[in-house]
Amino acid sequence: MNIPNSRRLWQKYPTLVGIVKTDYLAQKAFGRGHNILHSVMVAQYAELIAETERVGELAWIAGIVHEPHRLFPGITREEIERKLREYLARGLPAGALTEAETSAVVEAVREHSKRNDPNDNSVTVTLKDADRLTSIGPYHWLNAAQFRSTIPAVDPRFIMTSDPRATFKNPFSVLQDLKYTLEWESWLRLPKAKELGKPKFDAIRWYIGELEKQFEILGLLPFPDVLVVEQPTV
């Protein structure tokens, strides 16, 4: 895979990056899972996987500005759009985007957390894939352990299976959180995203398999009922 000049868009749009960084600092968004590093990684992935250079540039811009709903909790849909348009107006040179391109970026940010839709524009497709690539693999393993500190790393009753009570938002264990990301493999749509994602999904499967082996070697699969300690619900 040809890797583009990774600093090209930073050099082209330094004002936009600076404005967004200022908001992250003002909101003290340092130790969160969705911090400035997350936005940076999403933007970089977006440029890397896009099918055309222009879509990559638009999706990179969308990646840098894609978190106002988390930076400003409680912000309305209309306020999100105003904030995005403010970022673009203040952060980009005059005439950098057409109105159609501005609308495509705003739409991509608005839709990026939703499931795939056949009507997604090309910027939205790219941003969704980039966001998912950032949220899988070793980087996510560290985030999951850090930000789900109120639940156990592993519920030993559900190593080979999944906890039937679990949901994506309430997985009941960090291991279950990792398992949920495996379903994203079939959600990636761009060829380069699939190429970059495959080793990460393979690594998740390896990681889970090694954990199973560890418990099996210790004679703890299936886990003895007498040793079960019920965790308080969160």
Image (tube, grey):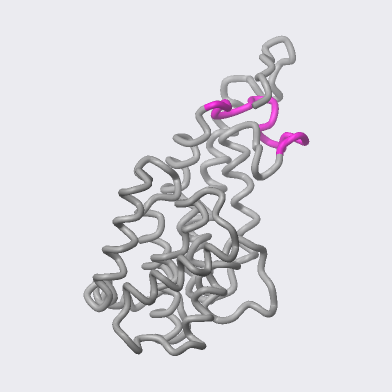
Q: Give percent across and percent down for residue 208.
A: 57, 40
Q: Position of residue 174 (x, y in %)?
A: 56, 35
**Percent position (x, y) of residue 131?**
50, 61
Q: Quadrant of the C terminus?
A: top right
On screen, residue 213 above or below 21: above
- The foreground one among 186 and 78 is 78
Q: Residue furthest top?
A: 226
Residue farthest to the right, as pictured: 164
In the rendered image, residue 162 lying in the magenta stretch gets the answer yes
Q: Quadrant of residue 152?
A: top right
Q: Quadrant of residue 221?
A: top right
Q: Residue at x 29, y 76 (%)?
A: 9
Task: Pick the residue in front: 154 or 76.
Answer: 76
Name the quadrant of the N terminus.
bottom left
- Left or right: where does residue 208 sit relative to residue 42? right
What residue occupies the far left of the structure in this picture? 11
Q: Nearer the viewer, residue 18 or 190?
A: 18
232 relative to 137, above or below: above
* 122 versus 228 height, above or below: below
Kindly report the secondary structure that dominates the magenta region of the rendered protein: loop
User: In screen coordinates, is 206 left or right of 118?
Assistant: left
Instruction: From the top left corner, tell me how far across and down residue 169 is, in percent.
Output: 64, 42
Residue at left offset 30%, top offset 63%:
19
Residue 225 belongs to magenta span:
no
Q: Residue at x 60, y 67 (%)?
A: 111
- In the image: residue 110, left or right of residue 141: right
Task: Please tell me how many numbered marks the rendered image carries.
Answer: 0
Q: Which stretch did the figure color magenta?
A: 150-166
Residue drawn at point x = 63 percent, y = 65 percent:
187
Q: Which sits in the foreground, 144 or 72?
A: 72
